[in-house]
Each structure stands twice: as C-alpha cells, then as structure tokens.
C-alpha cells in the first residue's frame, strides 16, 4: 500500500493538496483537497447596487479579473435590457483577449513549463526564453491597461460600456509586439511537443461556449462534444453543483450524471475551425488533434490560443474606431445569466435585482469549480498506470496533471510539501 499526501500543491493559484492511497495498483482513496477559506462573494454582493458588482467580482481573482468583470457586466446588462453597440463589443473582446494572453503566458511559462523541462521552478528556465515569456505576458497586460485604465483589476468597464475611449494611436504599437508574441508561442509549442511528457486518454465531456460568428469568448451557446447544446440561460437546468466534505470548492456535474472539462482543450475541441490559419497550421505541424483526450496537452492548446488570439487582436486594432463607448439605460428589476470564457474555462454569473437596482441574490461558478471533479476523475484514471513508480514520482506526476488544468484556487501561489508514507 502507498499513501501519498501532497500538503501544498506548488505552481497553482491558491491552497490545495492531494490525498492518495494506492493498494495493489488500484486507487483506494483519492481526494483533491481545496481548503482555501470560503470567501462568500455571492453573499456579500447581496444588498449592493447593481453597478458595484463589476468592481467587486473582479476581486474574486487576481488573474481572471477581466473575465469576471465582463461576465458580471453582461449579466447586469441583460437584467436592465442594455444593448451595447459594436464598438463596445469590440473593445470588450480585445480586453478579454489581453487577459487571456496574459494568463496563458503566466501559466505556461512560470507554472507548467518546468514540468515539461524537468526543472524545479521557473527561475531555472533558460533566461532568454524566460525573458521572451515575460514580454509575452506584458503584451497582454498592456492591452488590458490601455483599454481598462490599469493592467490589474481594470477600472473602465462599467454597465453600459466603458468610461472612456482609448485613442487608437495607443493601440497601434501593440501590433508589432503581438507578432513577436506569436513567434514566442509557436517556438514554445515546438519545444513542448518534442518533450516526452505523460499521456492519458480519457473520454471526458468537454464543454465550452460556441459562436458561429467568432471564436467564442464573451458570448455564445453552451455546447459539448457529447451533444449538449443550450443557451447560457439554461445552464443551471443542466449543470448541478454539490458540496463535498474535503473541498471548499463545489463539484459540478452535467445533467447530474458525470464530471466535465472546461478550458482550452474544450474550446479547441468545439471551435478548432475558428482558429487563425497560422494556429491551425502550427497544430498540424506538431500533430495536435482537435479531439485530443489527453489533459496534459492543455498547455499546447493554450499556446495555440495565444497564436490565434494574437492574430485576432491585430485585426481588432485595425477595425477599432474611436467614438462613444457607453449607451444609456434605465434601472429595473429582474434576473439574468451571463457566461464568458475565462482563460481556464467557462465563467458563470447570475444575479437577481429588485426594482431599485439592488442585488438580492447571486450565483457564481468559476471554471475551477467546474473542473474540480473532472480533475479527480482524471487522477483516478491516471494513477493505476503509474502505480509501480516511486511515491516521489507518483506525487510529481499527479501534481503535473492537476497543473495541466491551471486550477485557480485563489490569487496566491504556495510552495509544495510532499509527505509519502510506505505501508
């Protein structure tokens, strides 16, 4: 029997651990422990004005703040019947792209790449590559800063649009930087693909937004590779949450029957045809398949998204025209849902407002809540294939699989302590 205990998962956002017991090559007990203290965002939104939700929910995460703001503002606007113009949609899509590029760069290079290169941490990466990675992240941050007023927790996204119009001359210089971003991401895809990293084939249900007009980020239907096809308003009819004793993050199931995956692999599974030509060509070069069932390939998917979104960001900058970026609205009561694609997957917000615009109820499900059970199920499938390895290697590979999902447990990263006891 092997008892493996990871007290602190390293190179993930927040506090989590893993308890694992193996007997005769089979998993006898497995718990992904998420013990971050409950933060009660849904509760303290109650009683707040509708226009406070955008700013407050940004603080759910120090990485996915743009996604939370856009999800929140869209849900509130649906309640109020706000129909924003194309200029606002363009800017919101562009700032969302900046947030995704920044987050993907942070995860791939500083958190995940050491796994592939068998390095202890990001500081051991080749300095030239690390510098390119930081520049890549910086481009995403600058997109957010120019549109949002600052790179972290932007302040210009408001109900009805934005508080100001960024001059196009500030966006234009980013196009050359975005072309460099593509080169760095493409080089890294080649680097990772050449590494002999673990393989795992799991026939999971992959769920993501899908939009026939564009690669879905801020708007779309909720679809899966198993036939799910619903509007965002129907989400809670098909996706159920349950509390488990070992985790402060709820577990999600689709139609109450099984876990599912959200994130870059799911987005590519459903929307691969909408990637840019360069991204699709790169995927073909490295042998990445749209239907990939290997969670370890999620980082290849992230890099392909960087390439494609960099291409689109250049196009959006060319299309952008200065002008009014806020539309009028009247306050009224009601309830509504909005779902967007955060870097790690679908992000769900629901609010109920009274006639004075005061929030009376809220329901928020970030992507890590949706992935938590799927991660456990993947570990249960993977561990028997590595059960004969040393406890240290098993712990390392399980951590690597968890990191492939880029779980955003909270806004901090902790060091790893692994305790292994042989019985």
Image (cartoon, rainbow, N blue to C red):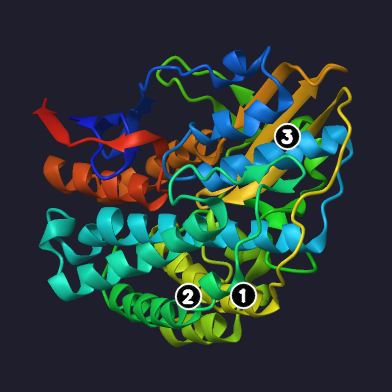
Mark 2 or mark 3: which comes first in sequence? 2
Whether label 2 touches label 1, CB < 8 Å: yes
Point 66% across, 59% down: residue: 165
Point 84% across, 32% down: residue: 79
Between the C-alphas of marks 2 and 1, the distance is: 9 Å
Report crowding for label 3: few under 14, some 14 to 19, many 20 or more residues within 10 A (C-alpha): some
Mark 2 or mark 1: which comes first in sequence? 2
Point 83% across, 58% down: residue: 85
Q: Is residue 30 above or below residue 88?
A: above
Say which residue label 2 marks.
174
Secondary structure category for the residue under label 2: helix
Secondary structure category for the residue under label 3: loop
Q: Nearer the viewer, residue 209 or 260?
A: 209
Between the C-alphas of marks 2 and 3, the distance is: 43 Å
Q: Is residue 241 above or below residue 122?
A: above
Label of residue 317 in the image: 1
Q: Nearer the viewer, residue 111 or 361?
A: 361
Looking at the figure, which quarter contains the C terminus?
top left
Say which residue label 3 marks.
255
């Amino acid at each position: 029997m092997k008892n493996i205990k990871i007290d602190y998962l390293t190179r993930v956002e927040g506090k989590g651990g893993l308890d694992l017991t193996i007997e005769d090559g089979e998993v006898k007990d497995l718990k992904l422990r998420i013990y971050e203290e409950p933060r009660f965002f849904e509760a303290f939104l109650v009683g707040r004005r509708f226009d406070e939700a955008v700013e407050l929910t940004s603080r759910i995460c120090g990485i996915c703040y743009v996604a939370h703001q856009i999800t929140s503002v869209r849900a509130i606007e649906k309640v109020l019947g706000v129909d924003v113009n194309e200029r606002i949609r363009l800017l919101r899509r562009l700032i969302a792209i900046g947030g995704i590029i920044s987050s993907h760069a942070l995860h791939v290079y500083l958190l995940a790449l050491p796994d592939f290169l068998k390095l202890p941490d990001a500081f051991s990466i080749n300095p030239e590559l690390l510098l390119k990675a930081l520049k890549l992240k910086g481009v995403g941050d600058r997109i957010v800063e120019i549109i949002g007023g600052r790179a972290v927790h932007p302040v210009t996204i408001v109900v009805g649009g934005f508080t100001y119009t960024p001059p196009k001359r500030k966006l234009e210089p980013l196009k050359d930087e975005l072309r460099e971003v593509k080169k760095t991401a493409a080089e890294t895809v080649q680097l990772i693909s050449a590494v002999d990293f673990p393989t795992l084939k799991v026939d999971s249900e992959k769920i993501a937004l899908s939009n026939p007009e564009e690669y879905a980020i801020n708007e779309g239907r909720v679809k899966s590779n198993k036939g799910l096809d619903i509007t965002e308003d129907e989400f809670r009819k098909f996706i159920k949450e349950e509390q488990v004793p070992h985790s402060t993050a709820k577990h999600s199931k689709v139609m109450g029957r099984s876990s599912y995956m959200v994130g870059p692999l799911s987005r590519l599974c459903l929307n691969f045809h909408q990637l840019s030509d360069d991204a699709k060509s790169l995927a073909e070069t490295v042998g990445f398949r749209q239907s990939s069932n290997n969670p370890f390939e999620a980082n290849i998917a992230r890099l392909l998204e960087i390439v494609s979104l960099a291409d689109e960001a250049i196009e959006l900058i060319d299309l952008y025209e200065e002008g009014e970026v806020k539309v009028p609205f009247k306050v009224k009561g009601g309830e509504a849902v909005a779902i967007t694609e955060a870097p790690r997957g679908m992000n769900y917000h629901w609010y109920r407002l009274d006639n004075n615009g005061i929030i009376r109820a809220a329901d928020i499900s970030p992507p890590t809540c949706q992935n938590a059970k799927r991660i456990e199920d993947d570990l249960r499938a993977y561990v028997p294939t590595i059960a004969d390895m040393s406890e240290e290697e098993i712990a390392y590979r399980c951590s690597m699989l968890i990191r492939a999902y880029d779980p955003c447990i909270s806004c901090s990263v902790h060091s790893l302590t692994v305790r292994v006891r042989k019985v």
